[in-house]
Image (tube, coloured by chain):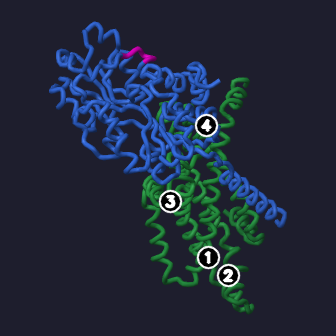
Amino acid sequence: MSGLWEFLHQRGPTILECLGQHVYLTVIAMALAIGLAVPLGLVLTRTRRAATPVIAAIGVIQTLPSLALVGLMVPLLGAGPKACITALFLYALLPIVRNTYTGVMGVEPAMIEAARGMGMTSSQILFRIELPLSVPVIMAGIRTSTIICVGIATLGGIVNAGGLGLLIWIGIDRSNDALIYEGAIPAMGLALLLDGLLALGERAFTPKGFQLARQEDREAV
Amino acid sequence: MKALRVLFVAIVVGVIAVAVWFGTRGGTGSIVIGGKIFTEQTIIGEMAALLIEHHAGLSVERKFHLATNLPMKMLRKGELDLYLDYTGTGYVDILGKPYKQEPPVEIYQYVKKVYPEKFNAEWLSPLGFKNTYTLTMRRKHAEELGVEKISDLVAHKNRLKAAFDPAFLDRDDGYPGLCKAYGFEFTQSPGQLVIGLMYKQCKNGQVDVIDAFSTDGRIAKFDLKVLEDDKRFFPPYDAAFVVRGEILRKYPKVREALELLAGKISNRTMQELNRAVDEEGRTEGEVAQEFLKSEGLIP
């Protein structure tokens, strides 16, 4: 136990510093990605013809190996957090756009029919019916992106963006496994924590009636 | 339900605020020191930082652990002001000159002459150590066989077992070029091992000859002998600071501070300093400070 205390006392500040940078890279990239991808997904449900090509185009970005994507950002944006955040942002788009689109498209047509019958306008239907009902699917996309981002942000370590990846890279260079763990374990913790936070958001924003229905479904099974 | 939403939004706002704070704070040093992602670069970078703080009275920002090709790119863009580089890297990789066994002094003079016009940057005096590829053996084993230099290996090529890291086996300035330059190959073709394992296997006697970087702390730790490159096959990699010209004009004291290290660090010293970090787990800053104090360069 005293060994652990000593370890934290010695290495804690470094790890915390790297963790902070890691949070910075991931959270800013995710905030930007959500800000663009959710509205884009919604627009695509209104212009369905564009949906397939747009989603395919965003999908192409994701086929690019992440190491290459980060590397390619450096000549464009200079080595630093900007290059890393841009790469993470691009990587995070696809799951969110796709899930927003599929989520909204998957809403029971009968519900939309009923809403229209009640005299709701198209935007009322979107914000009161379609969006709330697709929260679980959209959130699933956001959670996937977040976990991917926490992992890829480790590449920030070699492009002057800092983060927990730095500890991992140094560990590999010195064949020092302890350093690799110092980077990897907090990264896992961060991924779990952010995922938990988003799960909370999912619960908070899923309509009550829908939650109940899902629970009944589960009980029926 | 509503309380849950408020809680969630509050946490999200909090997390974003912390993230932005972390990303935007700091970064106010007037001199930015860069470094590549290996130990000796960080140690020497810390020394440069301490010397500039003490002797030029300027604040310093550190950008260490960069991918090896980044510091020069960043220096050219003005994103960093100085870093430690190696003359061979400047000559072969950055200026694209083919190495034709020129003596180290010529390589140094060439980069020193070309950098100011081409990159508006200057090479200061070499620190003393060279970080080049070398071949090494267990010291005792080399003494038993009477091997001093790489040419001496020819007589023992049938019996010696060699192992090299993957890059060395592949590079023209690695094993293939070495064979051509020295006109021999090991009879038993060399094994391939990652660097971390290579040193241990050599020490334990599973292999006899390995490649190594001449300043690696493990050379001292495992009592290995660096063989003399008598045909000057490996380009010289004298370590020296590369500094942006603008900085030297604006702050003449930066030059004075950094020149205090000129010729002060031998290969053996660099090995010891690297070992203190890699094997004894001390921080680069500590090791740098201790060295400067012992040399009387800082109070």
What chain is colored green? Answer: A
Report the residue at 18% width, 30% height from top.
B181
Picture coordinates of residue B9, whole percent (x, y) = 77, 63
Q: Quadrant of residue B253?
A: top right
Q: To which residue does mark 1 refer?
A: A104
- Kind of residue indicated by mark 1: Val
Tell me whether marks 2 and 1 sit on the same chain: yes
- Locate residue B135: give its quadrant: top left
Tell me, what hue is chain B?
Answer: blue
Q: Secondary structure at mark 1?
A: helix
Q: Chain of mark 1?
A: A
Sequence-first disc among 1 and 3: 3
Which label lies toward us, 3 or 4?
Answer: 4
Amino acid tagged 3: Leu
- Residues under numbered marks 2 and 1 in contact, where contact means CB atoms less than 8 Å apart: yes
Seen from the viewer's position, the closer of residues B87 and A124 is: B87
- Circle 3 packing at 10 Å, graded few (<14), some (14-19), many (20+), is few
- Badge 4: how crowded within 10 Å, few (<14), some, or many (20+)? some
Say what amino acid the circle numbered 4 marks: Ala
